[in-house]
Amino acid sequence: MAEETPTSGERTESASSKRREDFREKGQVAQSKEVHTAALLTSLLLFWVFYMPTFWRNLSALLIELWKACGEVAITPASFISLSIYLFQKIGILLAPLFVLVILVGLFSSVFQIGWIFTVTPLQPDLSRFNLISGIGRFFSKRSFLEVIKSMLKVMLIGWIAYKTVLDKFPEALILIDTPPMTLIGFLGKTAALILAKICGLLIFLAIADYLFVHWEMEEKMKMTKQELKEEFKESEGDPLVKRQIRSIQQQMARKRMMAEVPKADVVITNPTHLSVAIRYNSKQMEAPIIIAKGSGHIAMRIREIAREHRIPLVENPPVARLLHKLDLGATIPEDMFKAVAEILAYVYSLKGKSS
């Protein structure tokens, strides 16, 4: 059976750099919410382990201060407002490191995934978003269903981890029934920390899996058809047919300018079959002769016709003509060819009755 080839409408080609940039400008980037959640919860847990002693020490000092102030300060509307402001300030200072951490983790988790990007396209109003039918379609779409399934699985896994951890610690908890309250509180704190640590491990695993899936999904979304690649190439590089036409026009214009220089030549050196090179030399303005026109085939024949019309000598010298034709237009004659060209110019000047 013959191998099936993809049709022109199938998106089988990897996204070009321009298409990737267009997606970024529209704010359509591969960004996993699970990475944000895992990074935030893990960093908060680690930070809390180190910050907790300081937090409880400062909170205890604040509570002691309030307790002492209860018997010294009269309760009035003004004192109540002043006390409320004072409490908000103190609690705000205690919680400020946590708020700063949340902002920094959210920022760096986004930068880690998509880099620095600034676009207002997603914020621009789109009337199609207010379409009831399309809105219902998005609500019951395949992606929405997948997000619901992912959320349910995540909640079930977290619940199972918490249940399994508590179940394992239950025999130990029964022994602590008659222990002092602080021992029991410490046990509960350690158990809660263990549950959170396991949940963080689970979220990190889910974040890695979701990050890979989201990137794969975005790559599939950005894929292009062969026709789209051709159209993009035409837009960025230009239509090949138009480029050929432009190049042809440029060559014609350059050829006309070159032909206009032929009447200024002192001599045209030829190969009797297909080469012509026009040389010009002015001892007062130039250090060495220069090539002002050259060509092969019909261009060479046209150079000779113009030379005859303006009575410019044609000198047949195949070796010199071949060597000069290899040089660029406007190039100065190299030193190793000075002697050969000088002899030709001397011959031409003698014909014209000029002195070199």
Image (cartoon, helix red, strand yellow):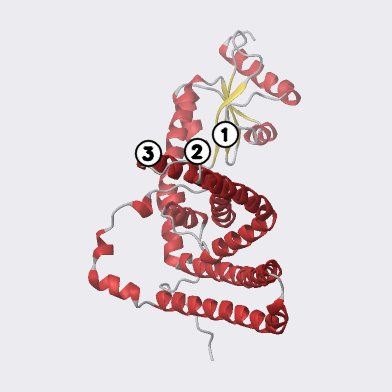
Looking at the rendered structure, the kind of residue marked 1 is Ser
Mark 1 or 2 closer to N-term? 1
Q: Earlier in the sequence, mark 1 or mark 3?
A: 3
Residue sitting farthest toward the front: 71
Judged from this view, the residue extending furthest toward the bottom is 1
Using the numbered discs, state the Cα–Cα distance from disc 1 to disc 3 in whole angstroms.
105 Å
Helix, strand or loop at disc 2? helix
Q: CA distance from mark 2 to mark 3?
A: 102 Å
Q: Is residue 238 visible?
A: no
Q: Secondary structure at mark 1?
A: strand
Q: Are marks 1 and 2 in contact (CB under 8 Å)?
A: yes
| Label 2 with label 3: CB-CB less than 8 Å | no
Count of picture labels: 3
Categorize mark 1 by other alpha carbons within 10 Å: few (<14), some (14-19), many (20+): many
Query: Where is residue 31 shown, x and y percent of the image?
Result: 51, 61
Query: Eyeballing the image, is 260 above or below 154?
Result: above
Give the amino acid at mark 3: Ala
Q: Quadrant of the C terminus?
A: top right
Residue 322 horizontal side relative to residue 118, left or right: right
Q: Which residue is mark 3?
A: 78
Q: Residue 276, which numbered label?
A: 1
Could you say which is closer to the camera, residue 110 or residue 116? 110
User: Residue 311 in the image: x percent, y percent?
Assistant: 48, 21
Q: Residue at x 24, y 59 (%)?
A: 127
